[in-house]
Image (tube, rainbow, N blue to C red):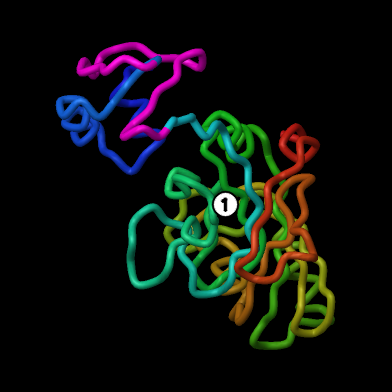
Amino acid sequence: MRLDKFLSDTTDLTRSLAKKAMHREEVMVDGVVVKNPATQVGSSNDVSWLGQSLALVGLRYVMLHKPSGVECSARRGLYPLAHELIELPKSERLNPVGRLDVDTTGLVLMTDDGQWSHRITSPKRRCEKVYEVTLDEPLEGEAAQRAIEMFQDGVLLDGEEQPTKPAELEMLGTHRARLVLIEGKYHQVKRMFAAIGNHVTDLHRSSIGPIALDETLAPGEWRHLSEEEVGSF
């Protein structure tokens, strides 16, 4: 790895600022001042800036219980960003594995391992995502059965050319349901219920594939995934 990239990966320096730091003789490799940003360094090298030894953080895998009012985005908008809740170095490099709307709560997986993320989000994977839904209007009896069949057959959403893939709807009460999806269209859950004349008032994601939201995590809390959880994808 180039020295300037190593510095940008392990400090708050951009690659441009890293080059300036090297020019000021602030950077050492194995005890020797190095000014060339293209110098190659690896795990066997001792790299320091202003006398502080640096080390790459490695790949991270995190489970977040996302609260309402938090965006799964890399760009700041009107709301706090999901990565800002993760108290880890360079948390801005943690990307959500499938986003949730700002007002949707529940499980968000975050990582800086792009290949692992792709294995989960790839359409070929058909990864199941489970949502707990609260509805504005009651859905029961024959109407509920029609909705179950309609969701299983696929719903042609407004503005889409292809119907949704088969989804499993289970009614938990007159206003509560569990929905299992294998895809992730824009606002899909809300749009599916809108297609049957109902409105989602509360939406919570409880699992992604074999990984379920840790019940001990309060909204806004996070933890590292276990080796078993990481290896499940």
- Which structural element holds mark 1? loop
Please state if 75 lies on the left or on the right of 150 as rendered: left
Q: Residue at x 71, y 45 (%)?
A: 225
Please state if 48 lies on the left or on the right of 211 as rendered: left
Q: Is residue 38 depicted above or below 179 in this figure?
A: above
Check if residue 36 falls in the magenta segment.
yes
In which quadrant will I find the N terminus?
top left
| Highlighted range, magenta | 31-52
Check if residue 210 falls in the magenta segment.
no
Q: For residue 156, what is the image quadrant?
A: bottom right
Q: Amino acid at mark 1?
A: Gly
Q: For residue 176, what is the image quadrant?
A: bottom right
The prevailing secondary structure element of the residues shown in magenta is: loop
Q: Residue 70, image x and y in percent?
A: 49, 68
In the image, farthest residue toward the bottom: 137
Q: Residue at x 62, y 32 (%)?
A: 119
Q: Is residue 191 visible?
A: yes
Q: Is residue 51 depicted above or below 2 in this figure?
A: below
Q: For residue 49, what is the image quadrant?
A: top left
Q: Residue 133, image x and y in percent?
A: 70, 73
Please state if 49 lies on the left or on the right of 177 as rendered: left
Q: Residue at x 80, y 84 (%)?
A: 174
Disc 1 target residue: 184
In which quadrant will I find the C terminus?
top right
